[in-house]
């Protein structure tokens, strides 16, 4: 039951091997274990079991650690009373569409900037990256007005998923991340394919995309998670209650909803993201450091 | 290849490249670049969507300055940012240093600390609102069980902002902790060995090896955190609505009110512009100072 030795860190291995070192290590380990579990897992346990308590039990002081009467039916009741099926669908449409459109816009753009290097390409890239310096909230009002009356087209996108998809597609971060990955693909590979008679689009689809799966996974996961978690923008542009996402719905109904139903709704709304995390943990944690550290 | 043929090929490449870039150029133009310009223009206009926009010079700014909530919102936002820096900067760093020394259950620690990051912020805010409940809330129950007296949490203007900072720290510390952890793992082990041979104890090694070696990441995350926390919105909007006694009205909450409650898009844009300038000045000064101290 020895842990992996690992590289040398702050505490020296010889100190750790001494009897005193071992005692200190296990005491610290236990403390951190208890603290992390209490701080991060216990609130989630409290929410899941809280949803299954009866309303009386939920209001009791002191509260019960384990429900006296398990009422898992609260989840089904919350699902029906809040019409959660519809709001899940709205959220999936918003997040899925934002994801697909972001890829459809950013992948060809990053490929063109990285491998075709057109005239003024660096200026275009610079103008895109400059938008990263802007705090998102500085653009809330003018983008809202733009979505309400799109210039040239004259359409009103409010209360449609396109109000979220289109602004999300203007993501300089995606283009930056993809371009950096494409830059590492050797030009010889592209040239060889050109000599074989392949055009740029064919090269993108047949050569570049298959070897870019890791970065595509990172961009995809972050696009979906960001769209699922977003609140302020959907709050502004999805004013018609029937079109709202889960976050906007929950915030709207929270003040008047019975507590056990609300907590059940909160748990249900988080499950997809928790599930996604459990499945794609490795990609998410790798993308977290890749995206922020070397940037 | 002859010169005209080469020129023709180069032209064809440019046309393909801009074809691939066209979608990105359209969404950036409509939903990023145009709103940037429009936001500045709106700051000096009065708009009501019936008449043409009217130029009003600095009237929007004068209105903001005469609003008693204006100073309150900035003070609250600075308080939030300051507190978030104390908690959100120190705790994740200490957590990462501790985790880096532990040889067991590493995957578990990484998993639980990142779980809250995956929860939609509205879910986190509503859950914590329930935990903060002075009656059957989790926190006061915990305090009472430990023999301490409870707190009013969100219900008192003395503790409301601090309570929001706790939520935000809990929700976001997973990503910072894991970024620090990744940075700690790149520190060469011989630096610690050399320091140890020179007789440096654990604290001196922490101060003279760990901190300087992770300096770049610490400085970047500090900047990003200030920029992010100055735009706090979801927690006060969902949990307190700005109360009690305006103690949690933040700049972005005030901006929301101007635009979507008072329908004064001009003044809301003026406030965005002020926030943008404040963050821009801070970022520029910060980068300049840290660069100078690095030389």
Image (tube, coloured by chain):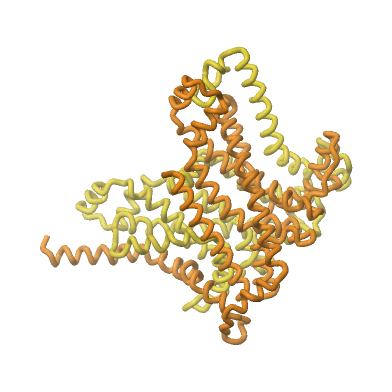
Chain colours: A yellow, B orange
| Left or right position of A292 against A39 | left
Residue ID at (37%, 47%): A210
Residue closest to the eye, A259 or B147: B147
Residue closest to the eye, B224 or A271: B224
Residue closest to the eye, A185 or B294: B294
| Left or right position of B47 against A187 | right
> Residue B135's x, y, as percent?
86, 47
Tally the marks: 0
| Left or right position of B13 against A171 | left
Picture quadrant where residue A92 is located? bottom right
| Left or right position of B135 against B17 | right
Vertically, is B204 above or below B142?
A: above
Residue ID at (66%, 29%): A33
Vertically, is B33 above or below A17?
A: below
> Residue B134's x, y, as percent?
84, 47
Q: Residue furthest top?
A: A19
Vertically, is B51 above or below B14?
A: below
Vertically, is A234 above or below B291?
A: below
> Residue A219's x, y, as percent?
47, 50
Q: Residue furthest left?
A: B2
> Residue B286's x, y, as percent?
51, 52
Picture quadrant where residue B229 is located? bottom right
Residue closest to the eye, A288 or A200: A288
Residue ID at (53%, 50%): B223
Point out the image quarter for the N terminus of chain A: top right
Residue A116 shows in this picture: yes
Picture quadrant where residue B202 is located? top right
Residue ID at (51%, 38%): A282
């Amino acid at each position: 039951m020895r842990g992996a030795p690992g590289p040398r860190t702050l505490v020296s291995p010889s100190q750790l091997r001494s009897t005193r070192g071992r005692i200190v290590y296990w005491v610290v380990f236990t403390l951190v274990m208890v603290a992390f579990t209490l701080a991060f897992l216990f609130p989630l346990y409290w929410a899941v079991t809280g949803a299954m308590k009866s309303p009386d039990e939920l209001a009791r002081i002191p509260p019960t650690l384990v429900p006296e009467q398990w009422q898992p039916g609260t989840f089904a009741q919350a699902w029906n009373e809040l019409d959660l099926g519809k709001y899940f669908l709205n959220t999936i449409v918003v997040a899925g569409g934002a994801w697909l459109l972001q890829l459809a816009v950013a992948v060809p753009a990053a490929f063109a900037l990285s491998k075709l290097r057109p005239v003024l390409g660096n200026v275009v890239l610079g103008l895109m990256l400059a938008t990263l310096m802007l705090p998102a909230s500085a653009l809330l009002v003018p983008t809202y007005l733009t979505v309400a009356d799109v210039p040239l087209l004259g359409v009103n996108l409010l209360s449609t998923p396109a109000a979220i998809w289109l602004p999300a597609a203007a993501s300089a971060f995606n283009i930056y991340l993809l371009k950096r990955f494409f830059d590492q693909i050797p030009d010889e590979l592209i040239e060889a394919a050109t000599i074989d008679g392949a055009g740029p689009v064919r090269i993108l689809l047949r050569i570049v995309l298959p070897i870019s799966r890791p970065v595509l996974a990172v961009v995809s996961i972050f696009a979906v998670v960001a769209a699922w978690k977003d609140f302020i923008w959907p709050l502004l542009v999805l004013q018609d209650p029937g079109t709202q996402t889960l976050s906007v719905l929950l915030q709207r109904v929270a003040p008047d909803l019975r507590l056990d139903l609300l907590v059940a709704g909160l748990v249900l709304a988080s499950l997809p993201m928790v599930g996604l995390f459990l499945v794609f943990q490795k990609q998410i944690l790798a993308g977290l450091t890749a995206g922020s550290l070397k940037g | 290849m002859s010169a005209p043929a080469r020129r023709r090929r180069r032209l064809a490449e440019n046309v393909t490249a801009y074809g691939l870039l066209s979608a990105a150029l359209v969404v950036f133009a409509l939903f990023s670049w145009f709103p940037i310009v429009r936001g500045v223009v709106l700051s000096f206009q009065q708009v009501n969507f019936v008449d043409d926009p009217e130029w009003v010079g600095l009237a929007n700014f004068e209105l903001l300055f005469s609003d008693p909530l204006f100073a309150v919102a900035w003070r609250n936002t600075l308080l939030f940012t300051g507190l978030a820096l104390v908690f959100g900067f120190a705790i994740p760093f200490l957590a990462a240093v501790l985790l880096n020394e532990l040889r067991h259950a590493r995957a578990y620690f990484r998993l639980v600390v990142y779980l809250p990051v995956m929860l939609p912020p509205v879910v986190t805010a509503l859950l914590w609102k329930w935990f903060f409940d002075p009656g059957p809330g989790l926190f006061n129950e915990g305090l009472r069980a430990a023999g301490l007296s409870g707190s009013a949490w969100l219900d008192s203007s003395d503790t409301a902002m601090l309570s929001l900072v706790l939520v935000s720290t809990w929700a976001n510390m997973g990503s910072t902790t894991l970024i620090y952890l990744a940075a700690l793992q790149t520190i060469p082990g011989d630096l610690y060995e050399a320091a140890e041979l020179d007789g440096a104890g654990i604290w001196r090694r922490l101060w003279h090896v760990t901190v300087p070696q992770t300096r770049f990441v610490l400085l970047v995350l500090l900047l990003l955190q200030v920029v992010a926390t100055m735009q706090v919105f979801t927690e006060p909007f969902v949990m307190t609505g700005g109360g009690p006694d305006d103690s949690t009205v933040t700049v972005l909450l005030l901006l929301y009110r101007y635009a979507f409650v008072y329908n004064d898009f001009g003044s809301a844009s003026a406030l965005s512009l002020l926030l943008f300038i404040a963050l821009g000045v801070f970022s520029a000064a910060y980068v300049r100072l840290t660069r100078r101290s690095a030389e």
